[in-house]
Amino acid sequence: MSAVLGFCGAGLMGAPMIRRLLAAGHQVHVWNRSPAKAQALAADGAQAVANPAEAAAGAQAVFLCLTDQNAVESTVFGPQGIQQTQGGWLIDHSSISPAATRDYARQLYETTGRVWIDAPVSGGTAGAAAGTLSVMAGGPAEALQQVEPWIRAYAARITRVGDSGAGQTAKLCNQTIVASTINAIAEAVALAAHSGMDASVLNGALAGGWADSALLQIFVPRMTAPAGQPLGALATMLKDVENIAALAQQTGTDMRGLRAVLDSYREAARLGLGPADISELVRVAWPERPPGPAAAS
């Protein structure tokens, strides 16, 4: 059934998710820090609004898909934030600290009665557009059951992994594997290139073996030729890897491989590659590689 929904964050991931909600017949009130991105969705039927409180007002649920923890905090608890409205559900698709999520969920419920579900996603922009995202959700089971039909507009798999904050923990486990794999692919590409091999054939040569994966098939071409449409900023992955390292320290988990991966992403940021597509991580191990369009922008 059609619902009135709010959505804050119309970036690379948020925009296709909003389009999927609209295509499913829902009314969506969209707020974005850069108003032009929200207004661009008007052609698809979205209603751009002036602030997060307006996005949440009268909505059965409000969704977040924001850059980082600071953006989530200001969007929810700022002067014109979602906290100014009462009741309903908040579904946070951002990737932030599990501890912060638990604090925010408690604070929001105590002040507004609104239930917070942390529901980070995996599958990238292509998955958002195709409606095949995987969602890792933390929060009350009954609340997730209520909002699941709306999330199904853009997600093929929705798994409740525990109470508040557990969704974010699962996302950091996901990013441990993803960030480490992308770093390994970058180093393999660099090793091939430095050995005089045509690195662009690696994904075909390794297809079907133990090294094969969706990431291998996506990133070898992007690391050996112009990347085209960005999949996400390198700085965004660095933010997640920093959160993984913090959680490892908090839980006493010895993650030696992760420390090396974090060093690679930090070095990429020091090289000025933070705004670039994540595939430009290859330039840490292969610095002489000509920059692609994403890195030059």
Image: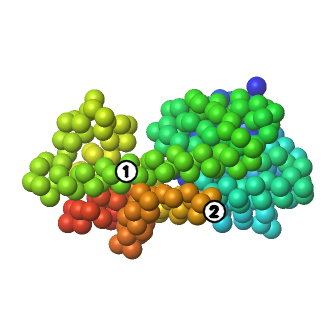
| Dot 1 alpha-carbon crowd within 10 angstroms: few under 14, some 14 to 19, many 20 or more | many
Location of residue 8 in the rendering, given as x and y in whole percent from the top left corner: 68, 52
Picture residue at 16% right of the left edge, 55% below the top: 193
Q: Which residue is mark 2?
A: 250
- Could you say whether the residue bearing mark 1 is in a helix, strand or loop? helix
Q: Secondary structure at mark 2?
A: helix
Image quarter (top left, top right, bottom left or bottom right) of the C terminus: bottom left
Q: Residue 273: in sight, yes or no?
A: no
Instruction: Look at discs 1 and 2 and give the one toward the viewer.
Output: 2
Q: Is residue 44 above or below residue 79?
A: above
Left or right of 105 in this view: 13: left
Residue 27 has which mark? none
Task: Name the residue located 75 percent from the left edge and 55 percent from the top edge.
Answer: 102
Q: Nearer the viewer, residue 89 or 190?
A: 190
Viewer can see residue 127? yes
- The span from disc 1 to disc 2 (Cα, nearest Å) is 25 Å
Neighbor class of circle 2 (other Cα within 10 Å; few <14, some 14-19, many 20+) is few
In which quadrant is the N terminus drawn?
top right
On screen, residue 30 versus residue 3, left or right, reads left
- Out of 228 and 184, give the one closest to the viewer: 184
Looking at the image, the residue that sits furthest to the top is 1
Label total for image? 2
Which residue bears the numbered disc 1? Answer: 182
Identified by mark 2, the residue type is Gln
Q: Name the residue located 36 percent from the left edge and 37 percent from the top edge.
A: 213
Quadrant hosting residue 78? bottom right
Look at the picture and state if 1 lies above or below 272: above
Query: Which of the two residues, 96 or 43, is positioned nearer the viewer here?
Result: 96
